């Protein structure tokens, strides 16, 4: 079957062209053209990431000789961990050609268009969430590419497992024109397909407000089923992808809190008695400063804790009020 994905040179050329177009639109200095330029620039960035992913899949830091042994090691590790057998899952689907062919098409063509559609929806409808999620995508994909520099054969290449290469069986493989192994086929660990599907579900659930948003959970479930039934990935490939994404999200959240805390501290140093400092602290999730605290607040405050801070210094010192209220100035 034809490969509907862009090659990395095609994606790189498209990204470069869009960057030039975005720069030209920005020079026009018109509001509507500037908005189009922003969208064009973000499209170029995503295409650039895709080109990097495709390019990184064309080589590895190790030869292909150890890829099969590493694939067998993952297979045996799954048996030790008592994970379900990929062969046992695939067998019930093999007598149904239409379902298997649908899974082949799903695996080959759907992952990238769905991701792009999700990013476009996020950019248009939920612009405030877009940059953070785009950064998550870039960090997750980059981390997976680093891991994939160590080649691991997919389960469809392992003899003795009973698994069938369904894409070859129905002449739907995008690798049929390539003789022997190549590095792109040996990038089974971790599964970027599964990781992207989980990220799409997270984006939809966290940004949408409809009660139907929870149906997005079906996407990573069906994706995992597709990659296993087609024998392109092990269970552990998807599990590791989910763990990598979790680490990226946790690191991003920690970095965001540190950056917000630093911004609050700097702003309060400049405007300790200003409402702007209080507003920044609320946006960062930091408890607001008591209005009567003599360290950093206006003496005109009327809160109970502020009055206590001013009228009973013997009972509640400024330091105590500082500690109890979470003032960070």
Image (tube, rainbow, N blue to C red):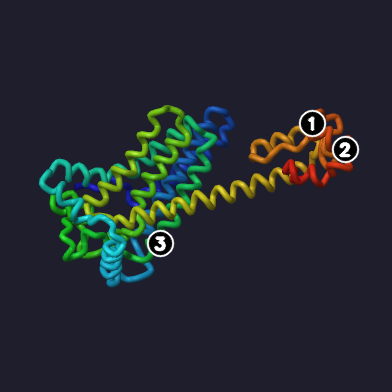
The image position of residue 273, as x and y in percent, is 81, 36
Quarter of the view holding residue 272: top right
State which mark lies toward you, 3 or 1: 1
Local crowd at mark 3 within 10 Å, few (<14), some, or many (≥20)?
some
Query: Could you give the CA–CA distance between mark 3 and mark 1, rounded to whole angstroms?
Result: 56 Å
The residue depicted at 47 percent of the width and 36 percent of the height is 206
Give left or right: position of 260 versus 304: left
The numbered mark, 2 or 3, whose residue comes first in the sequence reads 3
Query: Could you give the CA–CA distance between mark 2 and mark 1, rounded to whole angstroms?
Result: 12 Å
- The residue wearing badge 2 is 312
SS for callout 2? loop
> Closer to the camera, 285 or 151?
285
The image position of residue 270, as x and y in percent, is 79, 42
Q: Is residue 276 above or below residue 109?
A: above
- The residue wearing badge 1 is 304
Give left or right: position of 215 versus 48: left
State which mark lies toward you, 2 or 3: 2
Residue 94 visible, this orientation: yes
What mark, if any, has residue 147 been given in the picture? Answer: 3
- Residue at the extreme left: 95
The numbered mark, 3 or 1, whose residue comes first in the sequence reads 3
């Amino acid at each position: 079957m034809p490969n509907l994905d862009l090659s990395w040179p095609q994606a790189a050329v498209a990204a470069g062209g869009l960057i030039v177009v975005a720069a030209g639109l920005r020079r026009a200095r018109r509001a509507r053209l500037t908005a189009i330029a922003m969208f064009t620039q973000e499209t170029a960035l995503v295409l650039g990431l895709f080109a990097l992913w495709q390019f990184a899949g064309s080589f590895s830091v190790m030869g292909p000789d150890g890829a099969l042994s590493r694939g067998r090691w993952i297979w045996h590790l799954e048996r030790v961990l008592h994970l379900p057998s990929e062969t046992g899952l695939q067998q019930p689907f093999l007598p149904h050609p239409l379902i298997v062919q649908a899974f082949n098409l799903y695996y080959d063509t759907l992952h990238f268009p769905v991701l792009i559609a999700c990013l476009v929806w996020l950019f248009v409808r939920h612009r405030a969430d877009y940059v953070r999620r785009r950064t998550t995508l870039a960090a997750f994909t980059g981390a997976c590419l680093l891991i994939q520099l160590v080649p691991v054969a997919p389960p469809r290449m392992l003899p003795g497992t009973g698994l069938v290469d369904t894409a070859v069986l129905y002449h739907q493989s995008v690798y049929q024109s390539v003789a022997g192994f190549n590095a792109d086929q040996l990038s089974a660990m971790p599964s970027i397909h599964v990781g992207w599907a989980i990220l799409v579900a997270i984006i939809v659930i966290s940004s949408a407000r409809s009660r139907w948003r929870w149906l997005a959970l079906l996407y990573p479930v069906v994706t995992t089923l597709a990659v296993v039934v087609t024998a392109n990935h092990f269970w552990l490939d998807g599990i590791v992808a989910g763990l990598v994404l979790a680490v990226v999200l946790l690191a991003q959240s920690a970095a965001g809190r540190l950056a917000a805390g630093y911004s609050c501290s700097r702003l309060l140093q400049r405007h300790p008695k200003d409402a702007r400092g209080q507003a920044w602290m609320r946006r960062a999730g930091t408890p607001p400063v008591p209005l009567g605290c003599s360290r950093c607040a206006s003496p005109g405050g009327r809160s109970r804790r502020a009055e206590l801070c001013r009228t009973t210094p013997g009972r509640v010192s400024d330091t105590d009020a500082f500690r109890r209220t979470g003032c960070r100035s």
